[in-house]
Structure formats: structure tokens, C-alpha cells
Amino acid sequence: MDSTDAGDHELRQTRLSSFGRVLALVALTYVAVNFVASIWLQRPSFNGHSVPLVVAIAAFAALWLLLRGAPRTPRFVRVVELSTLSVGTAAFSTMALFMSLIAEPHNVVRSILTFMLLGYAVYVPSTARRGLSLALSTTANLICCARYALESTAMVATRRQWGAGPA
């Protein structure tokens, strides 16, 4: 789809705004459920592990708030779209750094990002090039965070095995 037509551009902006709102609400719901469950288990857990999710919520809320209302220029819409989605997906990817290795963080984060990209592809009218660029940036973030998480966990396990104590 070529988004040079004014009607197509307005539809794209409206859909991106709605998509940002849905992503922000889903991430906010996840944080709220974790927080309520931690209180119920008498282990309050709003700590450093929640910061990446709060960053993702802020990025997706910015996508929603910056693109709602009056039509914006196509350049502004593209800049807001790519910057907020890149920050949001990078924040989601950093969840792999904080999750236990038993939970297989790379699989959890990959599933979250896959469903997000599928929702983007279905709901937001876009060109194949834009979708591919978003998917590649998301994949790069995920690979870097998952690799770092796995390496740091392997390093801690090696230190414990050889008696160097906890890391």
C-alpha cells in the first residue's frame, strides 16, 4: 500500500495511535497483575525488573498520544512510529535480562514480540519495507539481550561451580 494518499495517511495515523494505546494497556495490565500477585504472595516486587516494562508503557503511550487527533505530516508519523516502537520493543527485549533462565526468557520475549509484530502487520496499513525494518530492529534487540542474558547466567554458574562464590 502506498501511503501518499491523504485518506490512507489519516487511516494509518489513526491505526498507529490505536495500536499504541492497545500495547500500552496490555503492558500496563501485565505490570498490574504482577504487582497485585506479588502483594497477594506478600512479596512486593515493583523493583528494577519492572523498569523495562514501564519504559515500554511510556513508549507505547507516546505513540498513542502523539498520533491521536489532527492529521500529522507523513514524516512525523514515520519518525514517531519507528522511534517509539524501537524503544518499546527494546524495552520488551530487556525482560530477558531479568527473567529466570528456567522460564526460558528468550522464548517468552520472542513470543511477546512475535504477537506484537503480527498485530502490527494485521492492524496497521503499511508497506512491506516498513514492516521488515521494524521486524529486523526487533530481532536485533532480542538477539543481543538474549545472548547477554544467557552468557551472564553461564558465567554465574561457572563461578559457583569452581568455588568463586556468588556473582
Image: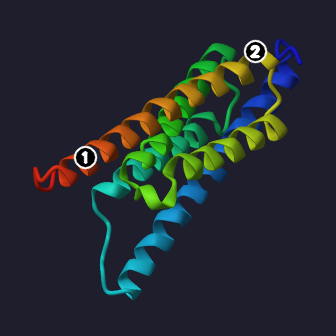
Residue 44 appears at what percent x and percent y?
Answer: 30, 76
Q: Please say if 36 is above or below 28.
A: below
**Residue receiving disc 1:** 158
In depth, the one of 16 and 67 nearer the eye is: 16
- Give the residue type at disc 2: Arg
Disc number placed over residue 129 in the picture, else none: 2
- Distance from the alpha carbon under mark 2 to that under mark 1: 43 Å
Instruction: Estimate how packed mark 2 is, as few (under 14), some (14 to 19) or many (20 or more) residues with alpha carbons within 10 Å.
Output: few
Q: Residue at x 81, y 40 (%)?
A: 123
Among the 4 quarters of the image, the one containing residue 101: bottom left
Q: Residue at x 67, y 40 (%)?
A: 17
Residue sticking out furthest to the front: 162
Image quarter of the N terminus = top right
Residue 148 appears at what percent x and percent y?
Answer: 37, 36
Among the 4 quarters of the image, the one containing residue 27: bottom right
Tag nearer the camera, 2 or 1: 1
Sequence-wise first label, 2 or 1: 2
Q: Residue at x 52, y 26 (%)?
A: 83
In depth, the one of 37 and 58 nearer the eye is: 37
Instruction: Estimate how packed mark 1 is, as few (under 14), some (14 to 19) or many (20 or more) residues with alpha carbons within 10 Å.
Output: some
Q: Please say if 131 is above or below 18.
A: above
Residue 121 appears at what percent x and percent y?
Answer: 79, 35
- Give the residue type at disc 1: Thr
Q: Residue at x 56, y 35 (%)?
A: 66
